[in-house]
Amino acid sequence: MSKIFIKKDRERMWQSGHPWMYSGAVEKIEGNPEAGSVIEVYNWKKEFIGYGHYNKNSKIMVRMLEKDINKKIDLNWYSEKVKEAYALRKMININSNGYRLIHSESDSLPGVIVDRFGAYLVVQASTLGMEKDKEFLIEALKKEIPNLKGIYEKSEGDGRKLEGLPEVSGVLFGEVPDEIEIFEGEAKFTIDLKGQKTGFYSDQRDNRILMGFLSKDKDFLDVCSYTGGFSLHAMVNGANSSTLIDVSEDVLNVARKNLIKYENVEFIKGNIFNVLRDLVKEGRQWDVVNLDHQN
């Protein structure tokens, strides 16, 4: 295995928990490592400090993975990381079957996002190293996550472009429907797994719940509504009405499904700046306003 040596004191970030080695921190490289391969990393004293994914074409030359020299970055290693991430989410006891299962560096898997929606997973790989190890990752998910029916990949975005990777999407395992239903507390959502990002913004859960609490007996305005997550929580919690604005007819159609059983819900397609100017001219007002592009 090729080796990379880090300049004096540059290993401190890794020792304190930061898993990136920038190109400016590199003193020398031994061997001819392939971009995306696993490489051994040493400090200036030639002491082993870990394994990492190497990419000479990225400013982040090494994304660190493991400190234990006795570990191998193989299927067993990936299975261990997935198992740890799943155990952590079970411990948190989230009141939803839609949540972020793997959050990249936070779960010691740099360049990987995995969201779980019931029996389905949506995977994003944004680095060359994870692209090359994707088979290990998928096998580990199949092994460690119970009752899976399908895994869908949606590896898109600027991160892949910076790593020299094309955007890819498609079913990696099982069968994946276009839409499924998930729950978040008392709210039930229809989501499009093949839609924007990974299909749903799980990281906004607490904000959606808070907005719902604040909206009881209020008129609610949802700007950049996406599929209506905030509006649904508002209506579930007794809002008088909700007005959703989004530029995409496709996401508004999903929002209509999410809010189909509620009256006093208005859907407006258009550029938010133009729409809001028109609504101001009409003298429209609301009690609670949500303005967020990640619903």
Image: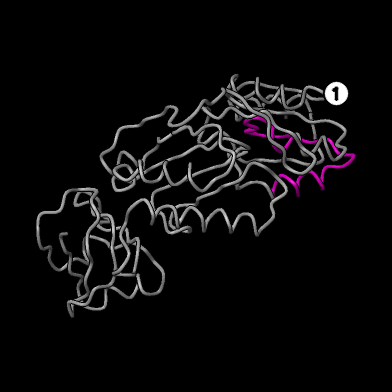
Part of the protein shown in magenta: 207-231
Residue located 16% across and 64% down the image:
3
Q: Position of residue 41 (x, y in %)?
A: 23, 67
Image quadrant of residue 260? top right
Q: Position of residue 85 (x, y in %)?
A: 53, 55
Numbered-mark total: 1
Residue located 67% across and 47% down the image:
205
Q: Position of residue 114 (x, y in %)?
A: 50, 44
Q: Is residue 259 above or below residue 58?
A: above
Q: Is residue 105 something that shows in the picture? A: yes
Amino acid type, mark 1: Glu
The residue that mark 1 highlights is 263
Q: Is residue 272 above or below residue 287?
A: above
Q: Is residue 276 something that shows in the picture? A: no
In what element is the residue under mark 1? loop
Between 112 and 256, which is closer to the camera in this rendering? 112
Quadrant where the N terminus is found in the figure:
bottom left
Residue located 33% across and 75% down the image:
12
Q: Position of residue 5 (x, y in %)?
A: 17, 69
Q: Is residue 289 above or below residue 107?
A: above
The answer to whether residue 51 is magenta is: no
The answer to whether residue 223 is magenta is: yes
Between 254 and 292, which is closer to the camera in this rendering? 254
Instruction: Give the left or right position of residue 71, taking residue 46 as reference.
Output: right
